């Protein structure tokens, strides 16, 4: 495995930092591949080649999703943000405002009986009530 993108000596990295580096590097490579296949597919006039390239692009999407899931399972901070933003329907900035509002309220102890964990991004279902879910 290549480590040419390390910004510090490998020996100072924690196990968590080293593994996250590998996962992030792999995710970037998979997303680059998606982009490259998509562009080449758009730029070919040969229909069969286009279909092969699009097929390959979809496989790279699968690879990216698998790596992202590994990151979610192994990094609590990422998991919190993924839980906040993925598979929501409200405008994304509104999701952020709702999440930040909840964190601020919980930090100040002003939730008045509402329970919930205060981890960043967690418990999004609890506060995306009413207007956010209806959109
Ligand atoms: Fe791949």
Image (cartoon, rainbow, N blue to C red):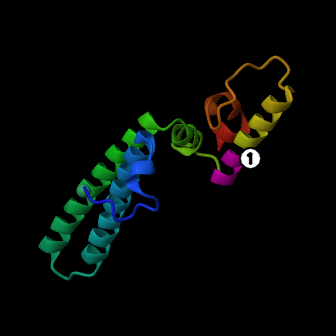
Relative to 82, does residue 7 appear above or below in the rendering?
below
Q: Nearer the viewer, residue 135 or 64?
A: 64
Query: Could you tell me residue 125's position as x and y percent?
Result: 62, 30
Q: Residues within 10 Å of mark 1 (few under 14, many from 20)?
A: few
Q: Quadrant of the C terminus?
A: top right
Closer to us: 61 or 133: 61
For this view, does 79 lie left or right of residue 36?
right
Check the image and report above or below for 134 versus 7: above
Q: Residue at x 61, y 32 (%)?
A: 122
Q: In percent of the image, x 20 and y 68: which residue is there?
A: 53
The residue under label 1 is 97
Q: Quarter of the picture for ligand 1? A: bottom left
Tell me the SS state at disc 1: helix
Q: Is residue 33 magenta?
A: no
Residue 124 horizontal/vertical position (percent): 63, 33
Which contiguous range is marked in magenta?
A: 92-96
In the rendered structure, the answer to whether residue 58 lies left or right of residue 21 reads left
Residue 26 horizontal side relative to residue 88, left or right: left
Residue 44 screen position, x and y as percent: 22, 81
Q: Quadrant of residue 132?
A: top right
**67 up-or-down from 49: above or below:** above
At x 34% / y 65%, what residue is drawn? 4
Choose between 65 and 20: the one closer to the eye: 20
Q: In percent of the image, x 42 and y 57: which residue is there?
A: 9
Question: Is the N terminus in the top left, top right, bottom left or bottom right quadrant?
Answer: bottom left
Where's residue 21, x and y in %? Answer: 40, 52
Q: Is residue 26 above or below residue 121?
A: below
Most prominent secondary structure in the magenta stretch? helix
């Amino acid at each position: 495995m290549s480590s040419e993108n390390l910004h510090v000596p490998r020996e100072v990295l924690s196990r968590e930092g080293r593994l996250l580096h590998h996962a992030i590097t792999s995710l970037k490579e998979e997303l680059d591949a998606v982009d490259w296949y998509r562009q080449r597919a758009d730029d070919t006039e040969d229909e069969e080649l286009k279909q092969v390239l699009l097929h390959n692009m979809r496989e790279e999407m699968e690879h990216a999703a698998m790596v992202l899931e590994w990151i979610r399972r192994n990094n609590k901070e990422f998991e919190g943000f993924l839980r906040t933003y993925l598979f929501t329907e409200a405008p994304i900035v509104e999701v952020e405002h709702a999440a930040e509002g909840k964190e601020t309220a919980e930090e100040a102890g002003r939730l008045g009986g509402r329970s919930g964990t205060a981890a960043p991004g967690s418990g999004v279902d609890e506060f995306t009530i009413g207007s956010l879910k209806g959109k």
